[in-house]
Structures are given as C-alpha cells and as structure tokens.
Image (cartoon, rainbow, N blue to C red):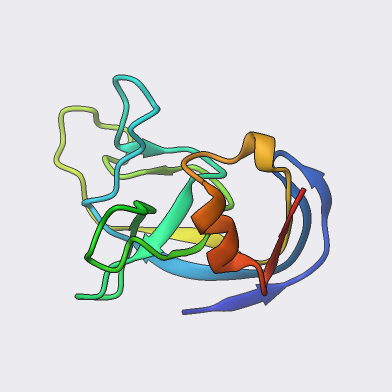
C-alpha cells in the first residue's frame, strides 16, 4: 500500500485531499448505480476491505465479509475490464482518499454508517 500526501481543493467530490492510498481493487467490486457498466467504478464510490485477501470492493453496510466497514472513497474511476466490455473483470490498482474532506452529495454508495466509519479521518460536508 503506497501513501501519497498533498493538498488539492475543489476536485469533483473531494473538497480537500490530505492523504491518498494506493490499493488493489478486487475483480468482485461493482458499481451498482452505473447502469450497464457496473464494472466501471466511478470516482467517489464508497469502498470496503474484504477480510479475506484485503482487497477493496464497494462498501455494503449489510455485508459480513469486511466490506460493511467503509475505508475510503475512490479518487478516480477504475475499469475492472480495462476497456473491453466482453472481458472478465480483473483486479486493478486504484487510489483511495484516506484523509481529507468530501462533498457528501457527490459520493456514491455512502450512508450514515460509512460516514461514522470514517469520522476520524474524513470530514463529510
């Protein structure tokens, strides 16, 4: 897991970046709100970490596989099929906001429980 720090204001859902983390996004991740392209994960998607393997998938408050705890938000989109819609999804690198401030109205898949999970690291406005 690589760490990057800097400050940037006004980038999409992010109000301020303080720390980003390089992560592995599991081929099991889906963006259910991205109709017809659920393998294309959009920036701002809430992410959870699988207990087995430690890869990230979409946050799911009702799950019991580790993804019920939100660990951050995707900084940029991730295409799990690498541009080939007929291909199988594969694990891909992704960048996750770890510490910062976000615009809650532009987040995807986040809820009050996710905000509580991140309350010590991410300010939700």
Residue 106 versus residue 53 in the image, above or below:
above
Q: Nearer the viewer, residue 58 or 39?
A: 58
The answer to which quarter of the image holds residue 10 is top right
In the image, is 120 to the left or to the right of 53?
right
Identify the residue at image location x=49%, y=42%. Answer: 77
In the image, is 13 to the left or to the right of 94?
right
Residue 110 percent coordinates (x, y): 51, 46
In the image, is 56 to the left or to the right of 100?
left
Q: Nearer the viewer, residue 48 or 85?
A: 48
Q: Residue furthest top?
A: 36
The answer to which quarter of the image holds residue 21 is bottom right
Residue 91 percent coordinates (x, y): 26, 57
Residue 22 percent coordinates (x, y): 50, 69
The answer to which quarter of the image holds residue 80 is top left
Identify the residue at image location x=33%, y=32%. Answer: 32
Identify the residue at image location x=59%, y=41%. Answer: 107
Q: How many marks?
A: 0
Identify the residue at image location x=30%, y=42%. Answer: 30
Residue 94 versus residue 53 in the image, above or below:
above
Residue 45 versus residue 4 in the image, above or below:
above
Residue 79 percent coordinates (x, y): 37, 41
């Amino acid at each position: 897991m690589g760490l990057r720090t800097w400050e940037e204001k006004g980038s999409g859902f992010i109000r301020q970046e303080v720390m980003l983390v390089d992560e592995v996004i599991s081929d099991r991740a889906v963006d259910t709100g991205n109709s017809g392209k659920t393998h294309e994960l959009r920036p701002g998607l809430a992410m959870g970490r699988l207990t087995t393997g430690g890869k990230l998938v979409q946050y799911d408050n009702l799950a019991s596989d580790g993804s019920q705890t939100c660990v951050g938000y995707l900084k940029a989109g991730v295409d799990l099929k690498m541009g080939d819609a007929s291909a199988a999804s594969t694990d891909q690198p992704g960048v996750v906001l770890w510490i910062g401030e976000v615009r809650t109205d532009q987040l995807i898949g986040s809820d009050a429980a996710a905000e509580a999970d991140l309350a010590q690291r991410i300010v939700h406005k």
